[in-house]
Amino acid sequence: MEKQAKIYIAGHNGLVGSAIWKNLQAKGYTNLIGRSHRELDLLDGVAVRQFFDEEQPEYVFLAAAFVGGIMANSIYRADFIYKNLQIQQNVIGESFKHNVKKLLFLGSTCIYPRDAEQPMNEEVLLTSALEYTNEPYAIAKIAGLKMCESFNLQYGTNYIAVMPTNLYGPNDNFDLERSHVLPAMIRKVHLAHCLKENNWEALRADMNRRPVEGVDGNASDEAILATLKKYGISATGVTLWGTGTPLREFLWSEEMADASVFVMEHVDFKDTYRPGAKDIRNCHINIGTGKEISIQALANLIIRTVGYQGTLTFDSTKPDGTMRKLTDPSKLHSLGWHHQIEIEEGVQRMYDWYLS
């Protein structure tokens, strides 16, 4: 990519998109464009076409998506498949029509089968059934990577699909109903810590920044306590969903951004499959650490980081989701990129960011 090239980051205010924007700026890219959801609804095909007509971006990072944790995936199944398919259809389609030089599509490692052999390399895609709880989202992301692959094979485009593992970092979503596991756990433990310490000033400040079900820091003590109790947060302890036994892999979002920019700068579609392959498929690239931690161990790490002295309980009547979901990042390693930030450092950074 040329430093002065016009680069569109779809989802530039989100967890990954904001990190990509910051990374590009730090590397000297000067012509970045982004639109908030209010300014451009990516579900609106006419609006997306008009945006591409007016801006004519040369490169596109498709980091916009409708995302959430296990609770949100269970409740909003139709939204997860419909909205993501629509976003992908509009952005990838208009990128093709407007001769975008290169596109990076961000998916998720939930695309892999529930019972895939661990660690999961790119070749296990579509070999058996998906995890039920996030099946709609996974199907949408599989469609996106196959759309990129198919445009490349039919039209000679240069669209690269990357599948990041679980991400966390600055600008994460801490909404207790919709957030992913790590930010949700950090906020739950922080709020329980405030209650344990009887620090209502800090608790009300948190609720004012991020109201829960419309309840903010101006509500009565009783209303706040009742609302937090619904999410397993009380003055005596924290209750988390599941058994705590599932293993998860986590990557710091700013490293995901660095890997994404690296791929856009150094990797082309021809680099994503074996030369001379009879059937060209599974050209996407895993982005992860290749390391995992149990949900219980992660919870204990967060508890130590926050300094919380209350109890931790797991509600085994609630779903665990996939028991193990570890990526094999060897393809990415062979292309020249490795992660640097381990989970212990990342959780400390995350909590420091949250407090600030």
Image: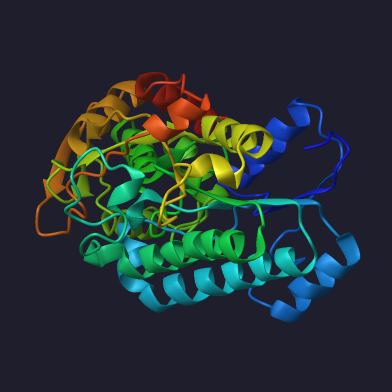
Q: Position of residue 322 (x, y in %)?
A: 21, 52
Which quadrant of the figure contains the N terminus? Answer: top right
Q: Residue at x 46, y 44 (%)?
A: 273
103 or 241: nearer the eye?
103
Q: Position of residue 48 (x, y in %)?
A: 75, 71
The answer to whether residue 180 is seen in the rendering is: yes
In the picture, measured across the screen, residue 230 lies left or right of residue 52, that is left
In which quadrant of the rendered view does residue 112 lie?
bottom left
Q: Is residue 349 above or below residue 108?
A: above
Which quadrant of the figure contains the C terminus? Answer: top right
The answer to whether residue 213 is seen in the rendering is: no
Q: Residue at x 56, y 48 (%)?
A: 209
Q: Is residue 345 above or below residue 172?
A: above
Q: Residue at x 13, y 41 (%)?
A: 245
Q: Position of residue 165 (x, y in %)?
A: 39, 42
Q: Is residue 297 above or below residue 152?
A: above
Q: Residue at x 23, y 28 (%)?
A: 300
254 or 235: nearer the eye?
254
In which quadrant of the rendered view does residue 331 lie?
top left
97 or 234: nearer the eye?
97
Q: Position of residue 11 (x, y in %)?
A: 64, 54
